[in-house]
Amino acid sequence: MRLIDFNLSTADLDRQLPLYWEHDHTLVPIQSLELTANQLILKPVKNSQPMLLDQFTTRTQQVSGQINLFVQTTTKAEPLFGYRLNEQRMLLG
């Protein structure tokens, strides 16, 4: 998923939605971001405070919309393909 697609699809959502990575039926809060030459990597950290959608938007304002979104796993950065809303949370996957 590209940043521009994510931003367009979330424009009308509650800005206070917390961001989580959903993996194997487990939710892990997204805590930080890392920008590389061609990837925006979301960093999940267990037992941490999740980043809010508003914080994500603020931190990525100056980033090219064409950059692809990834999530850091224990072994590598995996591409994000979308999200769903559940119980006032944004679940990325």
Image (cartoon, rainbow, N blue to C red):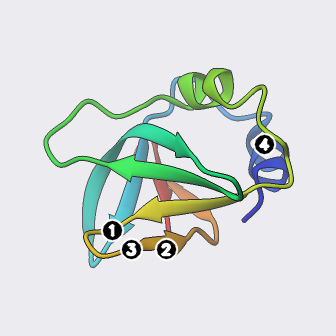
Q: Separation of disc 2 and disc 3 at Cα?
A: 6 Å
Discs 1, 2 touching: Cβ within 8 Å: yes
Mark closer to the observer (4, 2): 2
Side of 57 where 41 appears, left or right:
left
**Secondary structure beneath label 4:** helix
Q: Amino acid at mark 1?
A: Thr
Q: Is residue 69 visible?
A: yes
> Mark 2 and mark 4 in contact (Cβ < 8 Å)?
no
Number of marks in picture? 4
Please tell me how crowded label 4 is: few (under 14), some (14-19), or many (20+) other residues with Cα within 10 Å: some
Q: Amino acid at mark 2?
A: Glu
28 up-or-down from 24: above or below:
above
Q: Are marks 1 and 3 in contact (CB under 8 Å)?
A: yes
Q: Amino acid at mark 3?
A: Lys
Crowdedness near tag 1: few (<14), some (14–19) or many (≥20) residues, C-alpha within 10 Å:
some
1 or 3: mark nearer the eye: 3
Lower sequence index among marks 4 and 1:
4
What's the distance in space between the residues labelled 4 and 1, CA to CA?
23 Å
User: What's the CA distance linking mark 1 and mark 3?
Assistant: 5 Å
SS category of the residue bearing label 3: loop
- Disc 2 crowd, CA 10 A, few/some/many (<14, 14-19, 20+): some
Report which residue position mark 1 lands on.
73
Contact (Cβ within 8 Å) of mark 2 with mark 3 = yes
- The residue that label 4 is drawn on is 7
List x then y, in percent, for residue 12: 78, 33
